[in-house]
Image (cartoon, helix red, strand yellow):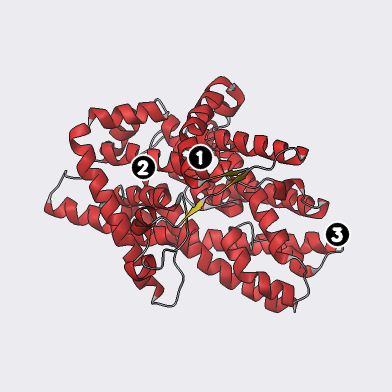
Amino acid sequence: MTIPPLLVALLALPVLLGGEQLVRRVRFLNRINIPAPVAGGLLVALVVLGVNLTGALVIKFTSTVSAAWWTWLVTIEPEWAARPAKSLSVPLLVAFYVCVGLNSTWAVVRKGSVQVVIFLAVATLLGVVQNCVGIAAAGALGLHPYMGVLCGSLTMTGGHATTLGFASLLEAGGLKDAVVIGSAMATMGLVIGSLMGGPIGGWLIRRRHLESDAPPEFQAAAAELAAPGLFHELRVLVAHRGAVLPHVVLVLAIVKGGAWASYFLLKTGVTFPTHIGAMLLGTAVRNLLDLAAPGWIRTEVVAPLGSVFLAFFLAIAMMSLNLADLANAALPMLVILAVQVGVMAAFAILVTFSVMGRDYDAAQMAVGHCGFGIGNTANAVASMQTLVEKYGPAPRAFLVIPLVGGMLGDLTNAVNVTLFLKWLK
């Protein structure tokens, strides 16, 4: 039984609302700050896994589309003419990052720019630690040394895309089934990374009595979103209905412009995710408009728009996960993963939080680091957003995490993995 993309998109709404009810009714989930789309999406993925394991029925989600009206926004025209297949959720993800860019005022950019460099160094150090831990664990278990890198920063910090990029090198070096093993490890990291950041961040914030020091406009926007939930966010948008349509048009225009921005960034010879070009363009547009027409872009509209885009993206992404990779995972991988999770938690608390300033934004960066350091950037930001709805905005963290987790960290991690593979030859 194959679920077509249109039905997957329609299912995102009940999955999201179901996740919100689950988090509200299960106090433990609320206490440890699990994002509602993650809760709802994982529940569906677990149900699908259970059904598939019985053998009575095989359910598969189709999450890629080539429909021209859907892919136009996130592709440049020469590519779009070939009707490329894109993930159903990509436009939603890019639109969310545009909203992150539109909320990056000059005050936030100026204050966060130095922290981008510092956090990049912290993230790079984590990758080195992950590889050292992975290689040591692989050696203790009598596995191929490349297994340590594959179960290290390659899958933890790198995720599925980086894993596929290096799989051929690993297999040429003697590690069989690198694609299968790496995909399973990255999937497990994605699930755990979605779950561990919230509890750690909530604990840091409560234990140290941390408070947001964001500018007043961010505090006002956060106050309107203090009651989390899709319907509440939609009610906030209705309250600002006169400004919503212009902001939506602007977001979509920047999504499209971001495709071209990413294309030109690719000409530098370095691979950048589509959403990074869009986020940087959104940041530029925000600051130019603040100079030309102060007050035109309203944070209290951009913030709930971004929350809605992110919620639907995560609901689609999480319920489409193939958890069979986890069910078939070998014991050695689970052992190494357990060690890496412990290392990630300790690193986030002892290193990331401390180096980034021990304040509220530093706690949010520790949350984000848990997300992309063992999963991916979208899940990192979702965990951060859940804490924002409880404790207040963290605009510096929301600038730093996407830049490092979604772009710069991938570059240093690729160098890191390459050096370790050369050393192990």
Looking at the rendered structure, the secondary structure element under dot 2 is helix
Q: Residue at x 54, y 32 (%)?
A: 33
User: In front: 418, or 250?
Assistant: 250
Looking at the rendered structure, the secondary structure element under dot 3 is loop
Separation (CA) of disc 2 from disc 1: 14 Å
Looking at the rendered structure, the secondary structure element under dot 1 is helix
Left or right: where 77 falls relative to 272: left
For the residues carrying marks 2 and 1, which lies nearer the camera in this image?
A: 1
Of the numbered discs 3 and 2, the one sitting upstream in the chain is 3
Q: Can residue 203 be seen in this view?
A: no
Q: Name the quarter where the C terminus is drawn.
A: bottom right
Q: Residue 306 carries which label?
A: 2
Of the numbered discs 2 and 1, the one sitting upstream in the chain is 2
For the residues carrying marks 1 and 3, which lies nearer the camera in this image?
A: 1
Residue position marked by numbered label 1 in the rendering = 315
Q: Disc 2 vs disc 1: Cβ atoms closer than 8 Å?
A: no
Q: Disc 1 vs disc 3: Cβ atoms closer than 8 Å?
A: no
Q: Where is residue 335 in the image (x, y as percent from the top left)?
A: 79, 51
For the residues carrying marks 3 and 2, which lies nearer the camera in this image?
A: 2
Left or right: where 390 falls relative to 155: left
Dot 3: few (<14), some (14–19), or many (≥20) neighbours within 10 Å? few
Q: Which mark is residue 141?
A: 3
Q: Position of residue 93 (x, y in %)?
A: 42, 50
Of the numbered discs 1 and 3, the one sitting upstream in the chain is 3
Left or right: where 92 falls relative to 29: left
Q: Residue at x 67, y 49 (%)?
A: 188
